[in-house]
Structures are given as structure tokens and as C-alpha cells.
Amino acid sequence: MNTLSQLPAWRALWSHFTRARDWHMRSLFGTDPDRAQRYWIEQSGLTLDYSKNRITDQTLTLLIELAREAGVPEQINAMFRGDKINTTEHRAALHIALRNRSNTPIVVDGEDVMPKVNDVLARMSRFAHAVRSGEWLGYTNQPITDIVNIGIGGSDLGPLMVCQALKPFAHPRLSMHFISNVDSSQLKEVLRRVHSETTLFVVESKTFTTHETLTNAHTAREWFLHRAQDEAAVARHFVAVSTNQQAVADFGIDPANMFEFWDWVGGRFSLWSAIGLPIMLSLGEKNFLAMLDGAHSMDNHFRTAPLEANMPVLLALLGIWYINFFGAGSHVITPYDQYLHRFPAFIQQLDMESNGKQTARDGQPVDYETAPIIWGDTGINGQHAFFQLLHQGTHISPIDFIASLDRRGSLPGHHEILLANMFAQGEAFMRGKGAEEVRDELEDQGLSAEELEALLPFKVFGGNRPSNTLLLSRLDPFCLGALIALYEHKIFVQGTIWNINSFDQWGVELGKRLAKTIFDELSGTTGIFIHDASTSRLIQLYHASNRTASAR
Ligand code: F6P
């Protein structure tokens, strides 16, 4: 198999880059004002303006050729066909089946997965309806008022992000709480606010072996039993979502109260599965299905659109252009919408756990960069915090601006300020501010020649900082579904080009194993084994300070 760096398009891009690195977007817009029309795509309720990038038609032609040579069309087909593209775990990656609203058969190991996908969806709907309608009663016959989701990583970030993003669609009686951290302060704070008679715990874990989740779930169960004083009451207040029926039963949750999913759903791609149960509880079946519809619409686009008009492919290629050629080590996600405040964290796991890898599919080390560091926060807050570095720092960090066009629901005047800022930032990042402009401005302010020359270098903005602008026609379940699917596919395309498996996560294993050994050492159930000098000293310090604390 050709490695990426030997592909003809890769080499052609390097030669193209020797010219492209000196272009300034201000000149590109000057000579080609139509680029705003050409580098613009609308799909599934989303509009992407990608004109503020350091590209020309030729750049795009070469990048598309790279996608072709790297086998992107074949890999897209392989994913939709249900091939086991997660090669190190011998699994398909079929989150697209979970939102396959057309219901066309998708076969894994000779079995069409759609009937079981639809069965679980129907069970989720029945359960969500019972809880939402008040038909599902707690052990003192009161309806549920609080849902506590216990899970971490993909079993937390997706449901949490969506429930926050779509709060205006939420059931008014149900308060949603999310516990992921094993630091007991998070659980303590929630348990202080809820009542055992009216709280439903949803324990979510693909493996049902995750130490943090099981510890939190056990503590919640003890808290509950201490109040209910009746083991039989657990069935009305604890449900589980997992692929591991035995472990759920061992924990003490009746498998009748378990919602299943399958090993071909990756944790970070699982919000479309039963892991989305908290979403359905909060938003209801109709909105959950609308979210699946939005994702399915993006799936259909991704599967069928030509590469040059394919939104996820274009976003992926722009990322490759900056990461592999300009050396951009990070990528910023900045929603101009408070409801999307957890979106950067969600994309961080999706991208960094998928493509943060250095071994190619054939087991050889890669000789090029892979996933960037994904970071970000809501844009308005970012402007008053980290945007300084983005404007004038030494790093190039491409930015995705995300906002909703629809101002309904916003208080008068607020949405315009929000979007004015977002558009202004995109413009400023692109244009910058040259020495002549600064000079004119300072002269107008009446600065002396000496003062002016001293201040001038600090006020110059180089600009030429790339960004994408993504506008949702409305922040609703359909558009959010499409937005999430867009990023999932972008990440998959990049993984394909880098020739890595985007669907495993071996990198998180080592820390988990070491933590288990050290946990036993900290709890005193074993002696201290040999660690490096630093780790041993830290363990001893922990013991010493707890001895001192308990002697006080
Ligand atoms: O440790 C990483 C990880 O395996 C993620 O991939 C996953 O989303 C998370 O832990 C939670 O895993 P589980 O759902 O099995 O508890």
C-alpha cells in the first residue's frame, strides 16, 4: 500500500505549498471576490462559508485528488456497507445504522442490524414516554422529576452536550444532571439537590467496567437504598445502558431495565444509540427522531455527494491542508451560542480520541502529523480570553465559528451583537490590520511621530488566519444532528487520509491499568510496588498526609 507521503497528490501539494504559504487572503479576496460564492455550501440546514481559507481552486483540486488517491470514496462505501473498518478490534463502525431512517438493510456478520436498532429505539420511546407522561412512578408513587446520568467520555459528553444545546425543547418537569467525575464532589452536589422518591438514575457504560462510572453508580445506589430501605425499589429508579448484560445484572440492575447497544458503536459515536436515552427523556421521542433525521440527511449527503461538493470532505481537507502543510498543531471550535457551550468538549473527544494516533493501519509509524489539539469555548467569552493569541500569537490555529441564524427565543438586540462579533472576528482574522492602516489611525488620534512609531508594531495584525463559518438555520434537533454527523464524517475522512484507524482508542489503556495498581496501593489493600522515584514519593506523600490528617 502506498504511504501517504508517496502519493502523487501529496507531492504535488507540497510543491503547490511553496507558493501558497506566501499568499495573503486579503489579496485572494481582492483578485477573486467570487470566492465567497464558490467556497460556500449548504446542506441539511447548515451553511458552510469556507472562503476565508488560504486556498485557491488549484489547492482544492489537489486536495480532492489527495482524497481520491488516499481511498476516501472506497472507505466511505466500506463504512456504509458495514465492513469491519475498525481493524484492530475487528468491528464495523456503524453509528450511521443508528440513524438510518430510510431503514435500508445494513448487514454485519450476515445479519441485518436494522431490526434490532429499531427494537431498541421503540423500547427507549416507550420508556421515555412513560417517564415524561408521569405514568412511570417512583417507590412512593410520585412521578420522576430528576434524571441523573452516570457515565464518562462518550457515555457522558454526547448526551450532556445535546441536552444543553436543546434545552428550549426540554420537558419542563424533568431536570437533567450529569455525573462523570469520580471526584465525589460532583455526585455529592447533585444528591444534595434531588429526592430519592422522584429521581431516576441512568447508568451508562458501553463496557460496564469503567471504574469511575461503577464507583459513582454504587455510591448512588447506596444513597438511594439508605432512603428507600427496599431493594425492590431499585427497579423503579435505576436503568442501565450498555453492551454488557452480565455486568449490568451483576451490578444489580434487572436486565429488563437495560437498554442495549452493540460493539459496532464506538463510545464517542454512541449518542444516537440507547446512550441517547437521557436525550430522549429530556426532549421526547419526536425531537430525538428529528436529531436522527438531521444526521441521516448529512449521512446521505456524505455518501452520495461528489468529493468537491461534499461538506464533511471539504472540512476534512481544509484541516489536512493546515495540519500537514502549514504545521498547524491545533484547531479551535468556537460556538457563538451559549447553548452550544459543551460542543467544543464533545468534539475534543470525538476528534482527539479518534485520530490522536501515530501508527498507520499497517502497523508502521506515520511520518506526518495526525490529529490536531482541539480546543475552544463559546466565542464571545473566548474573545475576552484566548483570542489575543489567535490574532497575534505565533501559532496558526484554524477556527470553526458556529452560530444559529435564527434569532427567535433571544432577547431583543442580543443575537445581533452576538453575530456581529462573530462576523467581525472572521473578517479581522482574515484581513488583519496593516502598518499603513495603523499609522492612519494613530495619526488621527494625534500621536506624535515618536509615539506613533513606538506603538505601531504592537497594533499591527498580520491577519491571514484561516476560519470556517458554520451557520445553522436554527439550533434545533435536526440541525444539531446534521452538525454532529458533519464532524463525525470530517474526522473519519481525515483518519482515512492519514491511514489510521479512527475507531479504536488503545492510548487510554495504559493509564487505566496503572491507576488500578496505584488505587490498591493508596487504599492500603496492597504494599507499594516498584514505581519510578517520583510516583513512589507521591504515593508516600499521600499516605503521610492522610496519617497526619486522621491523627488530628
Ligand atoms: O477511556 C476511554 C473510553 O473508553 C471512551 O472511549 C469511552 O467513551 C469512555 O471511556 C467510557 O467508556 P464506557 O462507556 O465503556 O464506560
Image (cartoon, grey):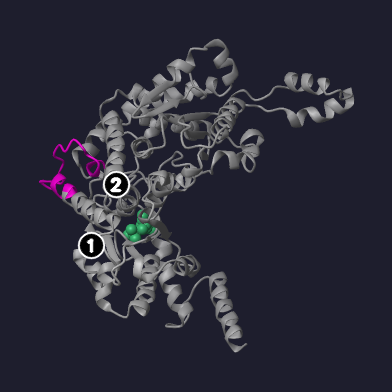
Q: Residues within 10 Å of mark 2 (few under 14, many from 20)?
A: many
> Which residue occupies 24% across, 73% down?
250
Q: Amino acid at mark 1?
A: Met
Q: Is residue 355 above or below residue 531?
A: above
Q: From the viewer's perspective, is 292 left or right of 122?
A: right
Name the residue carrying label 1.
258
* Residue 8 visible: no
Figure quadrant of residue 381? top right
- Say which element carries label 2: helix
On screen, residue 25 versus residue 298, left or right, reads right
Q: Is residue 109 above or below residue 21?
A: below
Q: Name which quarter of the figure residue 223 lies in.
A: bottom left
Q: Quadrant of residue 479?
A: top left
Of 161 and 54, nearer the camera is: 161
Q: Is residue 110 within the magenta segment?
A: yes
Classed neighbour count for the residue bearing mark 1: other residues with Cα under 10 Å, few (<14), some (14–19), many (≥20) = many
Calculate the distance from the C-alpha at mark 1 to the C-alpha at mark 2: 16 Å
Quarter of the image that includes the N terminus: top left
What residue sits 27% from the left and 64% below the top?
Answer: 239
Q: Quadrant of ligand 1?
A: bottom left
**Which amino acid type is marked by label 2?**
Trp
Q: Residue furthest bottom?
A: 551
Residue stretch rendered in magenta on the structure: 96-118
Indicate the position of residue 160 as horizontal and vertical percent values. 41, 52
Q: Is mark 1 within 8 Å of ligand 1?
A: no
Where is residue 145 shown, x and y percent of the image?
A: 37, 61
Q: Position of residue 107 (x, y in %)?
A: 14, 43
Does mark 2 have its CB less than 8 Å from ligand 1? no
Q: Is residue 235 visible?
A: yes
- Residue denoted by label 2: 272
Q: Quadrant of the C terminus?
A: bottom right
